[in-house]
Image (tube, rainbow, N blue to C red):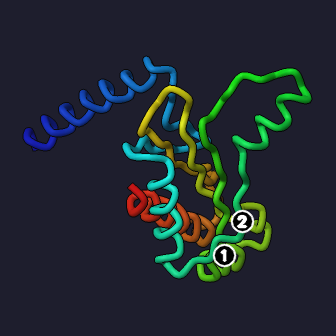
């Protein structure tokens, strides 16, 4: 029992140090709404690895939103030219199994499809890439919670494979 408590204290201590360092840099990797991972590597390589991680699970990429390009293009019209991202994309995908389970649990869960992983790099952060996803809400039904847990696990597996 004492060893578990000491381990808990050590993990908690290092968690506060890591979270504090990231927050001191002005970047919050996790909130109630989203979760991101900071990855070392070139954007191009991590992007290719992300595609392979998704398709390697037998999942089809449905579409890509080129967020950084859109912000540059529309920023000119708005008179707002600050460069927010070096690169930024939203990769949309769908899994027949995950979607079927989610929507059989509750047809209204269609609101959480398609599934999206975000990838971006920031100006001035060479060889640093961020990968993340929007968190799903707390569901009231056990079936929806189970289906949502499988989706989160898939997000986590894909991101782990892309790192």
Coordinates of residue 4 in the picture (x, y in percent): 14, 43
Residue 132 to residue 110: above or below:
above
Residue pointed to by mark 1: 99
Position of the C terminus by quadrant: bottom left
Coordinates of residue 51 in the picture (x, y in percent): 53, 66
Callout 1: few (<14), some (14-19), or many (20+) C-alpha neighbours within 10 Å?
Answer: many
Position of the N terminus by quadrant: top left
> As drawn, is 27 to the left or to the right of 134?
left
Dot 1: element: helix
Callout 2: few (<14), some (14-19), or many (20+) C-alpha neighbours within 10 Å?
Answer: few
Q: Give me the residue at 51% from left, 30% from top.
A: 28
> As drawn, is 4 to the left or to the right of 17?
left
Residue pointed to by mark 2: 63
Of circles 2 and 1, which is in front? Answer: 2
Residue 61 to residue 134: above or below:
below
Q: Give me the residue at 62% from left, 76% from top.
A: 60
Question: What is the residue that sits farthest to the top in this orientation?
Answer: 24
């Amino acid at each position: 029992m004492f060893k578990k408590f000491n381990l808990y204290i050590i993990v908690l201590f290092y968690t506060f140090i890591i979270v504090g360092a990231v927050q001191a840099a002005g970047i919050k990797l996790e909130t109630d709404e989203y979760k991101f991972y900071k990855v070392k590597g070139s954007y191009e390589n991590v992007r290719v690895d992300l595609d392979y991680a998704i398709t390697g699970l037998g999942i089809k990429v449905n579409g890509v939103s080129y967020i950084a390009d859109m912000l540059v293009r529309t920023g000119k019209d708005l008179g707002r030219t600050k460069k927010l991202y070096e690169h930024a994309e939203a990769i949309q995908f769908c899994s027949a199994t995950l979607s079927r389970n989610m929507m059989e649990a509750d047809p209204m869960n269609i609101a959480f499809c398609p599934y999206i992983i975000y990838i971006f790099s920031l100006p001035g952060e060479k060889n640093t890439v961020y990968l993340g996803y929007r968190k799903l809400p707390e569901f009231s039904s056990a079936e929806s919670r189970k289906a949502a847990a499988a989706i989160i696990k898939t997000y986590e597996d894909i991101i782990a494979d892309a790192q």
